[in-house]
C-alpha cells in the first residue's frame, strides 16, 4: 500500500519502476461496485475485476507457484 503524499500518477509510475506485479487501485467507484482496477506489470494490461475474483486469482497463482 502506498499511502505517501505523492500524486496518484507518481505512485503508479513508482510501482511500475519497482516492477510490482499487480497494481491494485481502489477508489470510491470501486468500493461502491465491489471491484478493483488492476494493472498487470507483465502484460501492461489495465482492467476492472470483481474484488473476490481477483483474490481467488492471486490465491491460485500462489498455490501453483513452486520454488
Image (cartoon, helix red, strand yellow):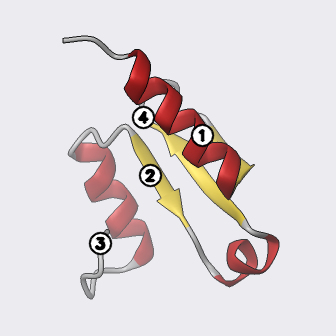
Query: Between marks 2 and 1, how big is the CA–CA gap?
Result: 16 Å
Q: Residue furthest front?
A: 63
Residue 19, given in percent of the width and then of the height, sits at 27, 38
Answer few, some or many: residues within 10 Å of disc 4's Cα (few below 14, many 20 plus, some between 14 and 19): some
Locate the N terminus by quadrant.
bottom left
Left or right: 2 as drawn, with respect to 58: left
Q: Which mark is residue 41?
A: 4
Of the image marks 3 and 4, the number of the one nearer the N terminus: 3
Q: Nearer the viewer, mark 3 or mark 1?
A: 1
Locate the C terminus by quadrant.
top left
Query: Between marks 3 and 1, how big is the CA–CA gap?
Result: 23 Å
Relative to 1, does residue 39 appear above or below in the rendering? above
Answer few, some or many: residues within 10 Å of disc 2's Cα (few below 14, many 20 plus, some between 14 and 19): some
Residue lying at 50% horizontally and 57% vertically, measured from the top left: 24
Residue at numbered disc 3: 2
In depth, the one of 61 and 42 nearer the eye is 61
Q: Which mark is residue 23?
A: 2
Residue at numbered disc 1: 56
Amino acid at each position: 500500500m502506498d499511502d505517501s503524499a505523492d500524486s496518484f500518477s507518481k505512485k503508479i509510475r513508482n510501482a511500475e519502476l519497482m516492477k510490482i506485479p499487480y497494481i491494485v487501485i481502489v477508489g470510491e467507484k470501486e468500493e461502491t461496485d465491489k471491484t478493483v482496477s488492476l494493472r498487470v506489470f507483465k502484460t501492461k494490461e489495465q482492467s476492472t475485476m470483481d474484488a473476490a475474483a481477483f483474490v481467488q486469482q492471486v490465491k491460485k497463482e500462489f498455490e501453483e507457484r513452486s520454488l
